[in-house]
Each structure stands twice: as structure tokens, then as C-alpha cells.
Amino acid sequence: MVEKMKFLSITGHKGDIDRVVDQYFSRYEIHLENALSELKTVPNLRPFTENNPYKEELIKSEDLIRTYLHEPVKNSPASSDSAQFQKLSAEEAAEIIQTLNQELSVLVEEKERLAKELEMLQISEKQINPFIDLNYDVRSILQFKYVGFRFGRFPHEYYKKFIDYVYDTIDVVMHKCQEDEKYVWVVYFVPKVISDKMDAILASLHFERFFLADEYEGTPTEASQALKEKINGLLARIQETDQSLSQIIQARKADLLAAHERLERFSTNFDVRKLAACTSHESHTFYILCGWMREKDAASFQKELENDPETFSFMEDNHDNIVSKPPTRLKNPGIFKPFEMFIRMYGLPAYGEIDPTVLLGLTYAFLFGFMFGDAGQGLCLLLGGFLLYRAKKMDLAAIISCCGFFSTIFGFLFGSVFGFEDIIEAVWLHPKDAMTRLPFIGNLNTVFVVAIALGMGIVLMTMILNVINSLKSHDPEKAYFDTNGIAGIVFYTALAATVFLYMTNHPLPAAAVLTVMFLAPLMVILFKEPLAALVEKKAEVMPKQKGMFFVQGFFELFEVLLSYFSNTLSFVRVGAFAVSHAAMMEVVLMLAGAEAGSPNWVVVILGNLFVCGMEGLIVGIQVLRLEYYELFSRFYHGTGREFKPYGKADMQ
């Protein structure tokens, strides 16, 4: 059903809005409306405009959680029920974030400085390592004045060419250091006067020069060792800094999370200003919030506000004085709640409109069971859907379980267990074999007859629901004179009664009675617009173009009769699927060799799985089609808007 709503206007001092939202909207669900739109008649209203003061600190807290706690912000532990969380003000929460951020910033800056120093030392170590076989003081070499020198490397093939063809032809001393798969690192010495010539020769041999800074102490080996010691020292200091960061963040973790959630709460609450309005009286400025609450929540809320001198609430009982339409909040028994999924697919009921969830749940599961009657397969759907719903909380799984329950019942009625019709006795009939003799038609499958009768009953029920909905919405044309109104009910009931009397060989009413039963409601349907105009006391009853009115009315009446016929026959599919299910399972058992007395159980199992999956899906879609096109189209509009609470539901 659709829960009853109350419209409230809440007002108080402008600076008190955060307290009110935090204190009340976290416990009461309210669907807020734009106050400027709702209160157009109130003079001197203006938007509530302010910059969010919590945004900057909230961003800092999110960065701290992601960086130091290494977890997504959304998955941070909720502490909204803790005493610490409840006591924190926005200023205290912001101060926690600022203090923690400052403490961590000092350590972070120190870590960054150490990291840069470490990077420079690692570069120096990488440069000197290839020359550790040189047993000579590096700084002394760098200070040579009359001897040219170069540190560098050759590709292997060019080093060999240099040794074979050049080395003995020029005054050069070359010391080979390290080598790997691609390169040979060397140091060479030449007289200063021929150093340019040597550079040119080596350039043609792809010699790559390395420049060493004047920072190394002792030989390359000694310098490398000294650098490693410095690097290890820096790594130890960086590790100590990380430990200090970790200790601080772990010690303040609870405070950080509580402050973050508190700031998040206040930041979210701040957005309520987008829907609020402001008004001034003398030197004071007040906020106004408008929205919908459930009736019982509204009563509790107003009672609580009696003890709050800073806040006032007014409840508007006359919906005609409200611009917005009440939102829809569905409340159904737990077993029918999963079927709300189908309602939402079609559209939520408007406020005051009949909620069809229970009707859809009953008819959907019942028709599914009728069309898919098998005790074995139904039990599998029942248990499988139930277990899946318990594990995943999927609404569709719960619907499958309900459908499986009715499939099991009809399986016993039809005497079918996994397609076998000789294991249990049919409580009612076997769909494929049961026949009924009807006048004029002859023999007709019984389930077809029952399906059509069932369809006629459902159609009449939806017509009654349409009358109720139309009376609620003050639409006399749809309630009294429409195809699905009282005129339609009279005509369709007369038709159903006449068919029943004829098929059961009972005498029909006199021709005059039949004429009144059929002709009178059809004339009412034909003249529904003029009759509605009379009821509503409009000045113009008949349209100006009367000829066109009668021509159009004639064809519309023909369409009405055709729709009654087609909608009724549409329910034949219910019986057709019941028969086809039995026929398909008969084919599976025939392929498995069940007639010989020793069936192939692998074929039986696979056949049952195939039929259960394929036909279950098709039947599910067909039943939903019947619900939408044959039931909902007669009485249901689905133009409601969902109740979206700003308060408790958004905070959790």
C-alpha cells in the first residue's frame, strides 16, 4: 500500500539550520521540496546562499584516510552511533583534521627531503659502480692538469675493434673496469696535446663518456662503499619517519574517522540550503524548509519540537494548498515486497492511487504456477530461489521462489513430477488430456476453458479497481462511463453471464432483457463525454461537430468490442502454456526412453534443466506481459514519484 504523507514547513533562526538537520533529519525521514517553489505566496523570500565551510577540511580528511589508512573513504568504519561521534561539533572535527594534518605535514616534508637526498646518492652510486676495479683515488684523477682522461663505456664489438686496430697506434693507456652483456666500462689516459684527437677517434667507435662529480672520497671501491653506508642510513631514517607517521595515524585513527564522518555529515547537511529559503523579520533572518513525512513520523516530529524553542513546524493538511504532489512510499508485507521491482519497472503509483503490488504478486505467482505446473521443477524453483535470496538478497530470486511454490501446487493438481505423470495421481486433471464439451464449439481442452474464465474474472476485478481509482481522483467519466468504468462492468458482466448460461445449457434471458443488458451500457460508453459534461455541470454538453462525434464514436465502440474480445482471448495463453509444458516433458521422456521402462536418467535430468530454464523464462515474460497489458492498462497509471528521504536513509 501507499503510506500516508503529511506536508510540513520547518522554520528557525538561520544559523541554527545545521543543528536542526543534524539532530532531526538523521532520525526522521523527510522528502524535501524546494521551499521557493512551494511558498510562492510568501513575500520577501530569497534563496539560502552560503559557501560550504566544511568542504576544504572534508577533502583533507579524505586524503588522509586514502593516503595513510590505505582504504577507500566509503568503506571507512561508521561511527555515527558512538558517543565520540555524537559529541563532536563541526569546529572540533575541523580542528582534529587540521592538527593531524600539521603533525603529519612536518614528517612528510622531512621524508620528502630525505627521499631527494637518497635519490642523489643513488645516482652517484650508479655512476661510480662500473669503475670500482680502478684502484686509484678518483678525486686525484679529476685534478690532473697535463694528462687527459675519460670515464666511459664501449659496446663490446667497438671495444674489440679499438684494441685490435687503434690501441697500439696511439699514445694511450686504457684501464678496463666492469663489463656486462652489452658494454665495457673503461678509464683511459692520454697526453693533453692529443686528447682532442683521441676524443674524435673514440667518438667514431661509439664511445659514451661519463662525467663524474668531484664528490668521491678515495678509490671507486671506497667511494661506492661510503655511498652505500649513506644510502642505508637514509633508508633507515626514512623508515623511522614512516614508523612515526604510522604511529601517529594509528593513535589518532578513531579521531580521524569520527571527524571525517562528522564533517561528511555537516557537509551533506549543508546541501540542504539548496532547497531552503530565507526570510527576514526586523533584524533577524530565518530559514524555511518544506517537505513530506510519513504521517506517524510527522506526529512524532512535531511532538518532539514542542520541547525545542528554537524551531517551529507547521503541518499543512489541505493538499490543495500545496504545489507539489505527495511522493510515493510503498509499504507491503515482506512476502510481497520483492514484487515491488515489477511495479517500479512500470511506474510507481501516484499518491492516492491503489498500490497493485499485492494484486500483482498473487496473480503473477498464480498464473505462473498454472502455466508451469510441475511439482518437481516447482520445488526446485522454490528452494533455489529461496536459497539465492537468502545469500544475495535478490528480489528476482524471491519472486522465483514464490512462483515455484504455486508451480508445486499446480504440479500436484496436474499430477506431474519432473514430467512423469504416473508417479502421483492428479488431484484435478492432466492438462493435455482433459476435455470439456461445449455447445456450438464441441470438445475443448478444459484448461483453455478455465483460463478464459479466470481471465474474465481478472478483467472484471481490474475494472472495479479502475472505478475505485477514478472516484479517488474525482474523474466521473472514467468511473461511470468509461470502457473500464461502471458501464463497462455492466456490459462485460452481462456478456460473461450470457456465455456461462449458454455453455451450461441454461435458458437465456428474454431478448428485451439482453438488449437492455448489452445496448444500454454500450450507449453510455458511446455518450461518455456528454454524460461526463452533464455530471460536471459544464456549459457545453454536446460537441459542435455532431456528425463527426457519431462517426468517431461508432468506430471507437467497435474498437471497444474488439478489445473486450481480444483481451479475454489473451488469457488462452495461460492454458496453452500448461498444455505445452506437459507436451514438452512428454517429448523429453520419450527421448529418454521412459516408455520402455528404463529411462536414460542423464537425458531426463538434462531435459528437465532445459525445459525448466527455457520455459520458465518464457512463462515469466508472458505472465508479466499479461500483468502490464491486460491488468495494469485498465486501472493503473503509475505516474507517482518516489519518496526520497533526505534524512536517515541518506545518512546510512
Image (cartoon, rainbow, N blue to C red):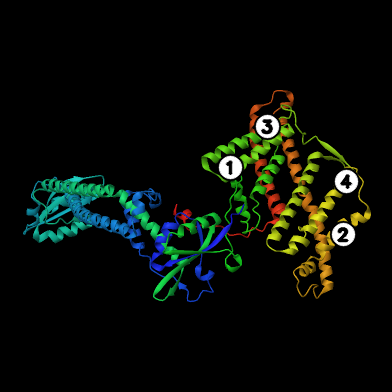
Q: Amino acid at mark 3?
A: Phe
Does residue 566 sit above or below 610 in this rendering?
Answer: below
For numbered disc 1, what is the local secondary structure? helix
- Disc 2 + disc 4, Cβ < 8 Å: no
Question: Mark 1 or 4, which is nearer the eye?
Answer: 4
Q: Amino acid at mark 2?
A: Leu
Q: Which residue is mark 2?
A: 519
Q: Position of residue 36 (x, y in %)?
A: 50, 71
Image point (80%, 34%), residue name: 433
Q: Which residue is mark 1?
A: 397
- Label 1 crowd (10 A; few <14 / some 14-19 / many >=20): many
Q: How far is mark 3 from mark 4, CA to CA?
A: 38 Å
- Disc 3 + disc 2, Cβ < 8 Å: no
Earlier in the chain: of badge 1 and badge 4, it is 1
**Nearer to us in this view, 266 or 234:** 266
Q: Position of residue 65 (x, y in %)?
A: 33, 52
Q: Which residue is mark 3?
A: 418
Q: How far is mark 1 from mark 2, CA to CA?
A: 48 Å
Q: Which residue is mark 4?
A: 501
Residue 95 in sight from this viewpoint: yes
Q: Amino acid at mark 1?
A: Ala
Q: How far is mark 3 from mark 1, CA to CA?
A: 21 Å
Question: Mark 3 or 1, which is nearer the eye?
Answer: 1
Q: As drawn, is 159 to the left or to the right of 70?
A: left
Q: How far is mark 2 from mark 4, CA to CA?
A: 19 Å
Earlier in the chain: of badge 3 and badge 2, it is 3
Earlier in the chain: of badge 3 and badge 4, it is 3
**Nearer to us in this view, 160 or 119:** 119
- Disc 3 + disc 1, Cβ < 8 Å: no
For numbered disc 3, what is the local secondary structure? loop
For numbered disc 4, what is the local secondary structure? helix
Image point (78%, 36%), residue name: 432
